[in-house]
Amino acid sequence: SGEPLDELFEKIGSQPDGASEKIFASGMIEWRRSHRQDGELIAGAQARIDRSMDVAIAKETERLSGGLPFLATVGSTAPFIGLFGTVWGIKTAFEQIAISQNTSLAVVAPGIAEALVATALGLLAAIPAVIFYNKLSTDSDRIITGYEAFADEFATILSRQLDA
């Protein structure tokens, strides 16, 4: 926006809520710490500023992707749980055949129905979990890429000031 960095930092403060603001604040805090009493910059300031912003990005990355492992676990294990239920239901159907010595639909149907319900429940859990995992993972990657681009752009601005 063309607003001087120090003024912008004073507006957002050192403990902002937004992710981009947190990245900016971490860079500005390190920028301010990197000056000696006489105003001269301490050697290695750019690297410390970059690392500070990398840490802020890592924290935001963790926050954004915190629930993704759970969705991945549900999406990958629910079909197997459904399959286990299917096997159990078919086993029950065969047991009923053995007990009654009859292969009529009335004997087999309850076990097969149980198997189909288990399969359906497994798929009912897995399909939305995989869809949401893919959506949130893609969104998270896109947002993190934006944070990294912002940090690089901000580091470039600070680098120009360092070289001035």
Image (spheres, helix red, strand yellow):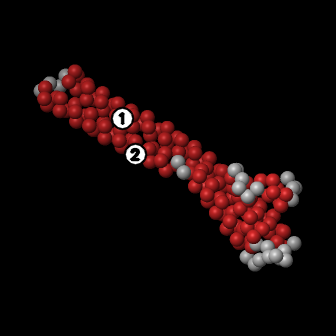
Residue type marked 1: Thr
Secondary structure of residue under mark 2: helix
Residue 8: which quarter of the image?
bottom right
Residue 11 at what x, y percent from top left?
Answer: 81, 53
The dot on residue 21 is: none
Rendering coords of residue 106 (x, y %): 22, 21
Amino acid carrying mark 2 in the image? Thr
Q: Mark 1 packing: few (<14 Cα in 10 Å), some, or many (20+)?
A: many
Q: Is residue 68 left or right of residue 16?
A: left
Q: Quadrant of the C terminus?
A: bottom right
Q: Which residue is mark 1?
A: 119
C-beta proximity under 8 Å, tags 1 and 2: no
Which residue is disc 2 drawn over? 77
Q: Position of residue 160 (x, y in %)?
A: 83, 68
Q: Is residue 152 above or below residue 111?
A: below
> In terms of image quadrants, where is residue 51?
bottom right
Q: Secondary structure at mark 1?
A: helix
